[in-house]
């Protein structure tokens, strides 16, 4: 028996019957549509399990140094998606995992160069990464697994692949995945095995040095790396001999363990991870589930494009390598960087420039003024406006009204079109909002800009010391106004404006503010 749905659903949390043999169960319907790397099409996304929880896993940082703005472009885009999902499904209906890679060639090499134990070395950079995530207003992930703590799970998965005939041991004790044993290899990156000559370049055209070991075929990749002298004390016992996991196996093992072997709804990462990393994850996880009829590793693949700086690849040698700390030292708040990183569409390369940061700062300040103006119009006075904003922020994801910002949300639902949504947001002029409409508009603006886009508004009030000459000009202007010498008052006001200061007149006096 079929299910008849209304032509339009009353809200994003409407439900529909999803039929799956041998019985039907209810899963949340979402109007959020997203590009799927696997199919190369923009498709509706939905949950795959009967509990209606959306499960997403995103590749995190390799903690050998501080995360750079290219890393964070990917992470803030994933955070916007997470927030949009929580609006559609409700709080508690999204499970978000993001891993930490704390054992690989780089972490081992750099920890030994500093004379530190691997765990001590990686923990310092993990804490730095977590602090940067907080500063950039990323929602806390529900799971943040590290590769080292999940080595037993990785060994278990490798044993399963050996048992299923999808892996083999090399003469040096390493274990490799036999790519030719998986007929669907290349389905994600759209590569054909017979055309594949190496695993040494990734899908962004960059060098991939994760698997520099001998193997039967150039396409095969390491699951377990035999102990080498340069590894120092960084090795673990296993049924295959002493060594450490290859890079790719960690994510498959952690996904398996965190999500109980279930199909996950979405897997995300930068476009550079599509091949070989994500392609190899697909092969490992599907082959470990040989004989599990109907098993699908991931329903939806979500990749964001890379970031350029001044039109070039970011590099320390070019002097265009930036971390969040570098940006803050230049005088920009984290919210400004966040705006700059999400302002371009996630599937298009983003060209980051300091001029672009200035534009982002102006845009954030304009949004802040719009928010304050709507709150003042809705609440009636400054104190009530502040309290109203604070109250609405606490339940922003659950607010039912979009006001005049419904068009912005509709664009965000369409393949996470942040630049389109921002364009619609700026079309709404607070001054044209009626008093009756102002509260509804305020709810919508907080829901779309503060919660969905994660922009931490209102901006904190920064106390700026007023130079004596500016204070003197402001007093002269006030005195002229009181004496009804409006021509002189206007001349002084223009001089203050030219110097970057704004006069704030009140009934009982005046104030001065830096523009």
Image (cartoon, helix red, strand yellow):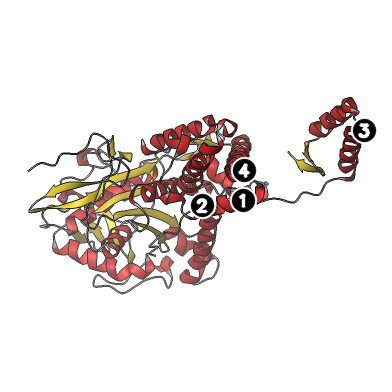
Q: Nearer the viewer, residue 491 or 311?
A: 491
Q: Is residue 44 left or right of residue 409?
A: left
Corner quadrant of residue 369: top right
Mark 1 is surrounded, within 10 Å at the Cα level, by few (under 14), some (14 to 19) or many (20 or more) other residues, namely some
- Residue 261: percent from left, percent from top: 22, 61
Q: Which residue in the protein does label 1 denote?
A: 384
Corner quadrant of residue 284: bottom left
Look at the image and tell me in which quarter the N terminus lies: top left
Query: Which residue of the protein is positioned furthest toward the front in this rendering?
Result: 436
The residue sitting at 28% across, 43% down in the picture is 45
Look at the image and tell me in which quarter the C terminus lies: top right
Which element is circle 2 on? helix
Q: Nearer the viewer, residue 469 or 388?
A: 388
Query: Which residue of the protein is positioned furthest toward the top in this rendering?
Result: 487
The answer to whether marks 3 and 2 mark residues whose Cβ atoms lie closer than 8 Å is: no
> Upstream in the sequence, badge 4 or badge 3?
4
> Upstream in the sequence, badge 4 or badge 2?
4
Q: Nearer the viewer, mark 3 or mark 2?
A: 3
Q: Which residue in the protein does label 3 denote?
A: 483
> Upstream in the sequence, badge 1 or badge 4?
4
> Upstream in the sequence, badge 3 or badge 2?
2
Q: Which residue in the protein does label 2 denote?
A: 393
Q: Say if residue 217 shows up in the picture.
A: no
Mark 2 is surrounded, within 10 Å at the Cα level, by few (under 14), some (14 to 19) or many (20 or more) other residues, namely some
Distance in Å between CA atoms under marks 3 and 2:
45 Å
Q: Which residue in the protein does label 4 denote?
A: 376
The residue sitting at 32% across, 43% down in the picture is 11
- Residue 492: percent from left, percent from top: 87, 31
The residue sitting at 39% across, 35% down in the picture is 410
């Amino acid at each position: 028996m079929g299910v008849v749905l209304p032509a339009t659903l009353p809200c994003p949390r409407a439900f529909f019957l999803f039929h799956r043999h041998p019985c039907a169960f209810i899963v949340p319907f979402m109007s959020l549509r997203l590009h799927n790397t696997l199919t190369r099409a923009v498709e509706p996304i939905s949950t795959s399990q009967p509990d209606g929880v959306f499960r997403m896993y995103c590749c995190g940082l390799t903690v050998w140094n501080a995360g750079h703005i290219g890393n964070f472009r990917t992470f803030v885009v994933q955070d916007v998606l997470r927030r949009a999902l929580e609006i559609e499904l409700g709080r508690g209906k999204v499970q978000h995992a993001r891993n930490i890679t704390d054992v690989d060639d780089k972490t081992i090499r750099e920890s030994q160069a500093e004379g530190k134990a691997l765990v001590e070395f990686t923990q310092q950079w993990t804490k730095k990464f977590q602090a940067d995530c907080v500063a950039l207003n990323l929602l806390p992930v529900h799971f943040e697994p590290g590769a080292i703590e999940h080595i037993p799970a990785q060994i278990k998965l490798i044993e399963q692949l050996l048992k299923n005939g999808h892996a083999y041991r090399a003469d040096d004790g390493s274990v490799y995945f036999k790519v030719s044993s998986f007929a669907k290899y290349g389905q994600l990156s759209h590569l054909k095995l017979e055309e594949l000559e190496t695993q040494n370049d990734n899908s962004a055209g960059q060098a991939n040095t994760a698997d520099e070991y001998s193997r039967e075929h150039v396409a095969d990749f390491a699951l377990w790396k035999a102990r080498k002298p340069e590894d120092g004390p960084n090795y673990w016992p296993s049924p295959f001999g002493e060594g450490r996991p290859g890079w790719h196996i960690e994510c498959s093992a952690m996904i398996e363990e965190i999500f109980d072997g279930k199909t996950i709804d979405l897997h995300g990462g930068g476009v550079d991870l599509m091949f070989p990393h994500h392609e190899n994850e697909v092969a490992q996880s599907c082959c470990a589930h040989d004989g599990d009829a109907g098993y699908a590793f991931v329903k939806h693949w979500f990749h964001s494009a890379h970031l350029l700086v001044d039109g070039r690849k970011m590099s320390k040698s070019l002097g265009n390598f930036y971390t969040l700390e570098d940006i803050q030292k230049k005088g920009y708040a984290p919210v400004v960087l966040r705006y700059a990183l999400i302002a371009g569409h996630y599937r298009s390369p983003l060209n980051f420039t300091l001029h672009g940061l200035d534009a982002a700062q102006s845009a954030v300040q304009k949004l802040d003024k719009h928010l304050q103006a709507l709150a003042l119009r809705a609440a009636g006075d400054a104190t009530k406006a502040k309290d109203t904003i604070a109250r609405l922020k606490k339940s922003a994801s659950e607010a039912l009204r979009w006001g005049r910002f419904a068009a912005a949300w509709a664009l965000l639902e369409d393949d996470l079109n942040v630049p389109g949504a921002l364009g619609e947001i700026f079309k709404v002029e607070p001054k044209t909002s009626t008093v009756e409409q102002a509260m509804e508009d305020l709810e919508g603006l907080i829901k779309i800009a503060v919660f969905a886009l994660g922009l931490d508004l209102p901006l904190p009030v920064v106390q700026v010391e007023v130079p004596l000459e500016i204070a003197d000009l402001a007093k002269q202007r006030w005195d002229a106004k009181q004496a009804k010498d409006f021509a002189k008052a206007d001349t002084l006001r223009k001089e203050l404006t030219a110097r970057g200061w704004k006069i704030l007149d009140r009934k009982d006096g005046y104030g001065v503010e830096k523009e």
